[in-house]
Image (cartoon, rainbow, N blue to C red):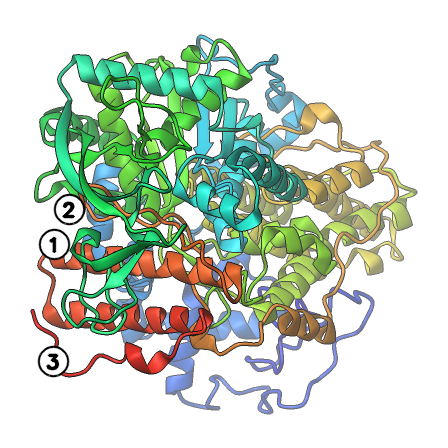
Amino acid sequence: MGESCPLGGGRDSGAALFPGELCSSPVFPEAEPRARAGAVSGLDAAFLGQDTKSVADVVVWGALFPVLQDEASLSNELQALRTWFQSMTLSEACRKAADSVLMPERLLEFKSYLQKQPPPCLAMERATSNEPEEEEASERALTEEEITAAADAWARGAAALPKPWHPQKPVLPVEGMRNVLITSALPYVNNVPHLGNIIGCVLSADTFARYCRLRNWNTLYVCGTDEYGTATETKAVEEGLTPREICDKYNAIHADIYRWFHISFDYFGRTTTPHQTAIAQDIFQRLLARGFLLQDTVEQLQCEGCQRFLADRFVEGICPFCSYEEARGDQCDKCGKLINAVELKKPQCKLCRGVPVVKPTQHLFLDLPKLEEQLEPWLERSWTTGDWTANARYITRSWIRDGLKPRCITRDLKWGTPVPLDGFRDKVFYVWFDAPIGYLSITANYTDQWERWWKNPQQVELYNFMAKDNVPFHSVIFPCSLLGADDNYTLVNHLIATEYLNYEDGKFSKSRGVGVFGDMAKDTGIPADIWRFYLLYLRPEGQDSAFSWSDLMLKNNSELLNNLGNFINRAGMFVCKFFGGIVPDMVLTADDKRLLARVTLELRQYHQLLEKVRIRDALRCILSISRHGNQYIQVNEPWKRIKGNEEDRQRAGTVTGVAVNMASLLAVMVQPYMPSVSVAIQGQLCIPPECFVLSPVFTCTLPPGHRVGVVSPLFQKLENDQIEALRKRFGGGQPEDLNVACQAKPTPPASDPVPAPASGSVVAPADPQLIQELTEQVAKQGNHVRQLKANKAEKAQVDSEVAKLLELKKQLALAEGKSPEILVPKGKRKK
């Protein structure tokens, strides 16, 4: 019943707000309007407070102004509302507000304030990104030119649409076309992605890739699993498999999850391939030849029994500050002091319990300071001509603000791309140097003509999708590697970064059973397209957002079932029930042409937003069109007119024909978001394949005489008991403070000569998964604390983050069966 009032926008109408305005339900269109309890009693009153204006009038007028400023769009049945609105608008206070704070640009500023993005910053980002000023399509008056143009486009029919483009395989750049190359951040192979990982990378990229294809842009979308590094070695030890077997196992899991979510990769690959070795080593050799690599000596602990240098998380010993006997190689759990592993007394290897020795080891560094003079002018060009999200720009600026430092690109590991240089052949490339090269090698596994994509910046536009913590490696380190290699590489034009998606009031945690992970979603009984819709509806574009079971139920039942699904089903059913399944003749009135113009504005805004990769906001345009459609049907009542005289029956035919064509347009617009639903609408309405393409105009694709198929509901209601069962199932059974984040790859501190791995301990006396997860969080938080100290952050901020670190370490000790009392720091810590 969510569309019971034409002004309701998908919400339950409750009591009528305005004298005399009582609304009926489009879900049951034949139902007569009924008075509800709580409706305004004074049907002849001029204002909400009866005879005089009140605060209530001002508040409601301000809320409705953006929707109702085009008063002519109100039907005659809403005369009381029209009169009240006009009276309020003519008052001096409201007139001033309409000319100032309620102007479209002021509304945008207020929106940005609510999103904790100050208007000056928003204005600056617009200036640098050439982003046009927005204006909500449903909030402004239509011009006669727009109405005439919409009617003309409608009359041209399918002839107004471009022919769909079907590229040959493999997809390669085409001269004269817009060639779009899309990547999503490569997921760690050893983790099962949760909903936050999915929306942050692959789903966002997939939605944009589908939109690009519907625009006839020549598009290639590649991704794959990131398979080298310490995390894979650790997982292999835990599961008693080789690193290769671990990669094979989890690559298949990732592929199955993305297939279920309908992610339309052109190729999904992996980084453990011969192409990866060849391309990474070539870039390395070119950097070496051009003087962009440095050597330096670093002291590390080496286990002679394991014949390997040990990452700090693989070492335990006596704390040099407080003598705690189980201090780790990065920090003491008791006193909280940060430690270099070589400072530990009586260190032990956690893999074999042998005694490691301190040995010097040589490492290679990317000379970022030397490359900075190439990086900065490139960034300025990319920011001027491309679309970078505000957080991507901010994070990048923060990295280069104080000058870049050399970055280590080698590790003392076995599982990785070998370093092709004498004296370093027992080392591998560090994952942050190696992993982004995976985009190139994965494309090379797709086609031997990969260089036409990756060494062709003149013809190719590159879009990178990721969560915000991956930004520095895509905006600074990887571009520096390619700039230094000097081989005409395609560099990122548009860097699209999301914030984080949380779970209910906490964080996703696989080991605690908290949150929905990719391999679990299909077992909920909720279709993949519903997951896609909801994740994209709350996509964290400007700030963190949170998954909520209650909100999922609300959005499914209101936006999908009662709004979008209700409109498309009614439009198709009217054709079947009243016109024998054949689209009737249409004689457009002035009101119909205004509707065509309004839909055209929504369609154009949809394009403007998606071209700027504002995926979440563009989804609102789809829902707005279906609301216009529901209101159009409700006002014109074709189920009544079909029983009237010839004029009424003709009007019923026109309304039905226009509505079913709106449904046909929605089938195409919704395809990037819900591809299976799009296919279902296409099948039910028998939409011709040549009409399945996006253009900037709304045209008649189902002309009179077109026969539709069997129409059936697109969505099912989610019941409260079903949702509560799922909430309980995925809520875990542990205290909330033990829920740990599993977002994306942690950012190592720039000051570390050999950054600590984002991997965990291999000792698992209790729950191995929990211990690994907590260990990763300890490493991540420890890195964060180091970075704050290196940047000389405020003491209060450092202390707060250290307290979080100690709490994580306490949880880790508990998970390992150790006493938590020893983790409480005593006295004031030394600086």
x%, y% of residue 812? 40, 68
Residue 700: tell me if it is visible: yes
Q: Residue at x 67, y 43 (%)?
A: 260
x%, y% of residue 780? 32, 56
Residue, disc 1: 790
x%, y% of residue 22? 66, 77
Q: Where 711 sits versus 297, above or below? A: below
**Discs 2/3, front:** 3
Q: Amino acid at mark 1?
A: Ala
Disc 3 is placed on an element classified as loop
Image marks 2 and 3: residues in contact by CB distance under 8 Å: no
Q: Earlier in the sequence, mark 2 or mark 3?
A: 2
Q: Residue at x 53, y 76 (%)?
A: 734
Q: Amino acid at mark 2?
A: Ser
For label 1, count other residues whose C-alpha is less than 10 Å away and answer few (under 14), some (14-19) or many (20+): few
Disc 1 is placed on an element classified as helix
Q: Residue at x 44, y 8 (%)?
A: 175
For label 2, count other residues whose C-alpha is less than 10 Å away and answer few (under 14), some (14-19) or many (20+): some
